[in-house]
Image (tube, rainbow, N blue to C red):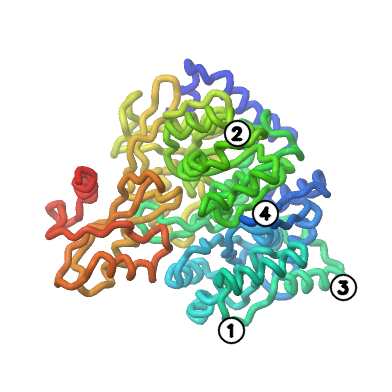
């Protein structure tokens, strides 16, 4: 079913038509129709100049900020450093591995201005996961926060990385404040390890770029002027349907189209140059990357960066010290805030809208938030492969049990196993097409062909459509587990467990969890006695990011299987829920 059919009789026809017209108007006037992301970034700097662009707010309230002008100048210098000092060619992959901090937007924009491809890397990754992503992407340069330098040191010789740039959480803070924070992190919290990496500091990298700029007649725009909306901008890694970590190729056009869609449906609620958005979700995640970093940068917002929202008290000073008007988050983040006395006693008075995605928003959480804060949580839906937004709830017309309606310019269908459209109210796989749908998986044409068929993205999620054009997710065709909005792929966890010689086989599933939405449970069959649940958990901690490690391990004599020997995770899940 196309959107034309959906909205012939739907109550949202007026809204949807207005949003579509808004996109068309912008295309015709070139207000938003940028050729590439650097063009958008530079346009924002020209418009908002000395406005604050980013502030990193630490749990104790110490903070540092950058203006739009500084971000523009520093990202220009980093682009020159990559192209002139390091000699990278256009299209070279540059990896970035850090939590939310001031360095991230500077280097992300600099990489794109250099005509290179940004590779976002989860800083929680283990050495094995880092090694895989660096090798798969072919990254030649890595910008990494000093907290993880020891992990890199152990594996860098096995990767194509030739140059390392080092930064810190307190980069570009007031020198005195930065010194205090560095001392606390290194000597008190002991989270900055010793290492022997040959690395360049981010300050030295920028100084090198600035020196070239001052000594040569270089126009940074020459690096990116030829980049088109069809060129790959970002490799965003995801497990997809198989659990094998793959690089999703998102083009400049994919990301800008999603930005344009956000703007078309939310611009009436955004006051350019005056918004303040809290970014507690990590910007290496596609949700915060597109919405917080790109869409709100375009609108001149002041972006408050929280390096880690865990524990949730880490967000308190951001709410105390800044007039937060927007926030993006997952269900568990909002639920955690609602259970904090400091938040419930003094809810934010400047909040306009909270944006939810990444995992299902619980109706009870949405209701409690609206009652306490006085403004809604607006839920959307999407995937890494869709940059990410496919559907959303129109602001002011939210439906708490729905992922909403398709984004402007997006077609959504519900189909059966043969690709035939299902009747209204009947469950089937949700498939989508639109300008935000990925180019494909990096160097994996077979995987791409499984997911993209005749221009349609097969999401693997089971949904139904109501007669008024709203969509509802009812189950996942994939066995992916969502832990606090992070994807956990059972195949990867099972592969880690299988490395233990005492293990015969295992099945990993997600079970409902009040704190994280879902929790990872492993059901294990042993080939010999002597291995404990704690042994398996300890082993997984050495190979997997913390959110992927099983919260519970249960030993079974055998696992349910199909006649051909495939483990039936659905039956494992059903039995687990009954226990």
Front-lying residue, 406 or 104: 104
- Mark whose residue sits in front, 3 or 2: 2
Residue assigned mark 2: 353
* Residue depicted at 58% across the width and 28% down the height: 374
List x then y, in percent, for residue 483: 41, 50
Chain-order first, disc 3 or disc 2: 3
* Residue depicted at 51% across the width and 66% down the height: 137
Left or right for 79, reference 166 = right
Label 4, label 3: how many angstroms apart (C-alpha)?
A: 40 Å
Q: Are marks 4 and 3 in contact (CB under 8 Å)?
A: no
Quarter of the image with the N terminus is top left
Chain-order first, disc 1 or disc 3: 1
Label ID, residue 61: 4
Front-lying residue, 484 or 298: 484
Residue assigned mark 1: 196
Q: Secondary structure at mark 1?
A: loop
């Amino acid at each position: 079913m196309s959107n034309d059919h959906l909205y012939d009789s739907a109550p949202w026809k007026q809204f949807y038509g207005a949003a579509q017209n808004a996109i068309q108007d912008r295309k015709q006037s070139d207000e938003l129709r940028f050729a590439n992301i650097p063009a958008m970034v530079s346009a924002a700097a020209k418009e908002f100049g000395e406005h604050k662009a980013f502030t990193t707010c630490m749990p104790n309230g110490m903070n540092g900020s950058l203006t739009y002008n500084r971000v523009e100048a520093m990202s220009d210098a980093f682009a020159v450093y990559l192209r002139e000092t390091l000699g990278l060619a256009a299209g070279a992959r540059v990896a970035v591995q850090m939590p939310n901090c001031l360095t991230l937007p500077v280097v992300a924009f600099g990489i794109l201005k250099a005509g290179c491809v940004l590779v976002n890397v989860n800083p929680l990754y283990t050495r094995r996961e880092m090694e895989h992503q660096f090798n798969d992407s072919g990254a030649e340069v890595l910008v990494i926060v000093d907290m993880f330098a020891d992990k890199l040191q152990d594996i860098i010789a096995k990767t194509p990385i030739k140059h390392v740039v080092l930064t810190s959480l307190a980069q570009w803070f007031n020198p005195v404040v930065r010194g205090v924070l560095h001392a606390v992190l290194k000597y008190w919290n002991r989270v900055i390890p010793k290492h022997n990496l040959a690395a360049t500091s981010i300050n030295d990298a920028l100084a090198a770029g600035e020196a070239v700029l001052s000594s040569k007649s270089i126009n940074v725009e020459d690096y990116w002027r030829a980049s088109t909306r069809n060129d790959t901008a970002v490799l965003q890694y995801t497990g997809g349907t198989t659990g094998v970590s793959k690089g999703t190729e998102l083009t400049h056009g994919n990301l800008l189209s999603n930005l344009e869609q956000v703007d078309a449906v939310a611009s009436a609620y955004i006051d350019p140059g005056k918004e303040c958005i809290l970014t507690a979700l990590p910007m290496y995640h596609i949700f915060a990357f597109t919405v917080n970093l790109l869409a709100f940068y375009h609108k001149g917002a002041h972006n408050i960066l929280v390096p880690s929202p865990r524990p949730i008290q880490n967000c308190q000073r951001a709410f105390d010290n800044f007039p937060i008007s927007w926030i993006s988050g997952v269900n568990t983040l909002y639920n955690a805030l609602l259970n904090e006395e400091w938040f419930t006693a003094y809810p934010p008075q400047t909040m306009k809208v909270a944006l939810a995605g990444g995992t299902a928003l619980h109706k009870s959480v949405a209701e409690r938030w609206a009652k306490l804060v006085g403004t809604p949580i607006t839920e959307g839906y999407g995937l890494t492969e869709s940059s990410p937004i496919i559907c959303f709830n129109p602001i002011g017309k939210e439906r708490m049990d729905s992922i909403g309606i398709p984004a402007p310019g997006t077609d959504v269908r519900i189909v059966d196993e043969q690709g035939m459209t299902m009747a209204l109210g009947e469950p089937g796989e949700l498939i989508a097409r639109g300008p935000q749908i990925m180019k494909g998986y990096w160097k994996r044409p077979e995987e791409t062909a499984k997911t993209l068929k005749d221009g349609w993205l097969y999401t693997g999620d089971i949904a139904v459509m109501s007669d008024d054009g709203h969509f509802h997710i009812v189950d996942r065709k994939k066995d992916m587990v969502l832990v606090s909005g992070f994807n956990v792929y059972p195949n990867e966890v099972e592969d880690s467990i299988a490395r233990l010689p005492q293990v015969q086989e295992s099945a990993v599933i997600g079970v409902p969890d009040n704190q994280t939405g879902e929790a990872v449970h492993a059901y294990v069959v042993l080939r010999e006695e002597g291995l404990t649940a704690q042994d398996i958990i300890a082993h997984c901690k050495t190979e997997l990011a913390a959110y992927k490690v099983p919260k519970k391990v249960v030993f079974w004599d055998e696992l349910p299987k199909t006649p051909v020997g495939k483990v039936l995770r659905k039956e494992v899940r059903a039995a687990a829920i009954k226990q």
